Image: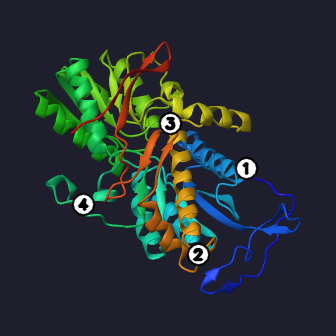
């Protein structure tokens, strides 16, 4: 939000707390006729703002920006003005790690939203932990990020207390996809492909395990490389195995091309993927009609949720250049969770931010609970969302249409 004046003031510590007049923007006069001094709290946002995944990244950034603007407009936290500072990771882990370091070094940042990619998150988590800076991802789905590398064996252990997410994990999404393919779409012979990344490989593995458990057969498994464009070898394998379907763990740039080339190879079968392909860019990336292709995504369609109507209207009123895309609602809720955590910390400290504000915000995030854009927002003991709503989408007449939504039950 823009203010008429923005003053950088000297930090003043009083009685072990950062007073609300310590730094930030000078706001309007209060009712008593004096001037009400406010502290500026910055929320960092890390996402791919350029490159092939920027359609998703810009939606993440804009949605957090909207949350900050609404909080400021409503004076959600007395004495605090929220500001957003965005960082471009280009979906590259090393860039994400550098961005995390920059955020930790910026003492005004009390929470971070992002990243989009699970692989990028892996490079950032340790940096945020050492800096006591909480992050809330609206899109990461790899289970290991919150439950540790041994989660599959049942030995769950939270690696980083500063990590939270508003998106459900691939444990849920992969199984949900397999159950739809087997029970609803009646598929029995699937060819599984992944992009060798943390998100794609993990999702494809969980899907394959559940599909086989249900009685289906994985007739082939292969991998592709991100940013490559020739998948004819994989496409010919799909055709030769007699697969009645393909499951792809990865993102939309490669997914759209894979769908295109599988069909060109003569295999007229649907491709299904996770939330990484649920974007109009998946359809645009394919030069062949891909009606019938499928994707799962976390949550229910934002446009169909009563809880999201205000978000959709407010987003439109801001006239952002880019749409909120697949993770807009989850990004808004991630930003709002940080705002609510800051609110709790300020209220518990006599209207002031304490010296250890970052640690207190992390602690408060674990107790946050509110009705958000995507439904009830709260976190379990691992920092995972308690919201396990998912939706299957199908490409119909050149556009994604929801075909099934439900709350997943283990």
Q: Which residue is mark 3?
A: 326
Q: Nearer the viewer, mark 3 or mark 1?
A: 1
In depth, the one of 332 and 18 nearer the eye is: 18
**Taking 151 as reference, is 75 left or right?**
right
Relative vertical location of residue 287 with respect to residue 338 in this rendering, above or below: above
Left/right of residue 40 with respect to residue 93 in the rendered view: right
Q: Quote the CA–CA distance across marks 2 and 1.
A: 28 Å
Task: State the image coordinates of residue 394 (x, y, percent, origin top left).
Answer: 40, 20
Counting from the top left corner in percent of width and height, residue 138 is at 47, 48
Alpha-carbon span between mark 1 and mark 4: 42 Å
Residue drawn at (75%, 69%) of the image: 24
Mark closest to the chain's N terminus, 3 or 2: 2
Question: Looking at the rendering, which quadrant does residue 123 occupy?
Answer: bottom left
Please name the residue that numbered disc 4 is placed on. 149
Q: Secondary structure at mark 1?
A: helix
The residue beneath circle 1 is: 73
Residue 1 lies left or right of residue 15; in this view the side is right
**Which residue is identified by label 2?**
105
Residue at (82, 57) in percent of width and height: 3
The residue at the point 31 percent across, 27 percent down is 235
Q: Earlier in the sequence, mark 2 or mark 4?
A: 2
Contact between marks 2 and 4 (CB within 8 A): the answer is no
């Amino acid at each position: 939000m823009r203010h008429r004046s923005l003053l950088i003031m000297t930090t003043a510590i009083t009685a072990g707390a950062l007073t609300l007049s310590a730094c930030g923007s000078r706001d309007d006069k209060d009712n008593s006729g004096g001037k009400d001094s406010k502290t500026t709290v910055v929320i960092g946002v890390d996402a791919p703002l350029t490159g092939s995944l920027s359609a998703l990244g810009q939606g993440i950034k804009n949605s957090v920006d909207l949350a900050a603007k609404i909080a400021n407009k409503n004076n959600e936290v007395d004495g605090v003005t929220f500001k957003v500072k965005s960082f471009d990771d280009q979906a590259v882990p090393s860039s994400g790690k550098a961005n995390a370091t920059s955020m930790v070094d910026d003492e005004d940042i009390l929470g971070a939203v992002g990243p989009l990619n699970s692989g990028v998150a892996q490079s950032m988590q340790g940096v945020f932990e050492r800096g006591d800076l909480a992050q809330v991802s609206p899109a990461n789905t790899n289970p290991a990020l919150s439950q540790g590398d041994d989660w599959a064996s049942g030995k769950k252990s939270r690696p980083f207390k500063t990590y939270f997410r508003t998106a459900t994990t691939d444990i849920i999404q992969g199984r949900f996809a397999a159950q739809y393919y087997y029970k609803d779409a009646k598929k029995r012979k699937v060819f599984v492909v992944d992009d060798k990344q943390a998100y794609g490989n993990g999702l494809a593995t969980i899907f394959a395990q559940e599909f086989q458990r249900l009685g289906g057969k994985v007739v082939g498994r292969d991998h592709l490389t991100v940013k490559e464009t020739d998948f004819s070898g994989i496409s010919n394998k799909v055709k030769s195995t007699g697969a009645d379907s393909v499951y792809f763990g990865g993102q939309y740039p490669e997914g759209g091309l894979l769908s295109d080339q599988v069909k060109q190879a003569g295999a007229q079968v649907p491709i299904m993927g996770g939330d990484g392909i649920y974007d109009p860019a998946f359809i645009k990336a394919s030069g062949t009609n891909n009606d019938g292709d499928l994707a799962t995504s976390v949550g229910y369609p934002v446009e169909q949720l009563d809880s999201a109507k205000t978000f959709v209207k407010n987003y439109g009123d801001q006239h952002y250049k880019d749409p909120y895309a697949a993770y807009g609602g989850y990004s808004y809720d991630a930003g709002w969770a940080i705002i609510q955590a800051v609110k709790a910390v300020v209220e518990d400290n006599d209207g002031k931010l304490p010296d250890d504000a970052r640690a207190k915000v992390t602690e408060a995030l674990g107790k946050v609970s509110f009705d958000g854009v995507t439904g009830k927002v709260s976190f379990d003991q691992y920092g995972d969302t308690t919201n396990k709503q998912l939706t299957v989408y199908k490409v119909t007449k050149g556009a994604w249409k929801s075909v099934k939504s439900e709350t997943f039950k283990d």
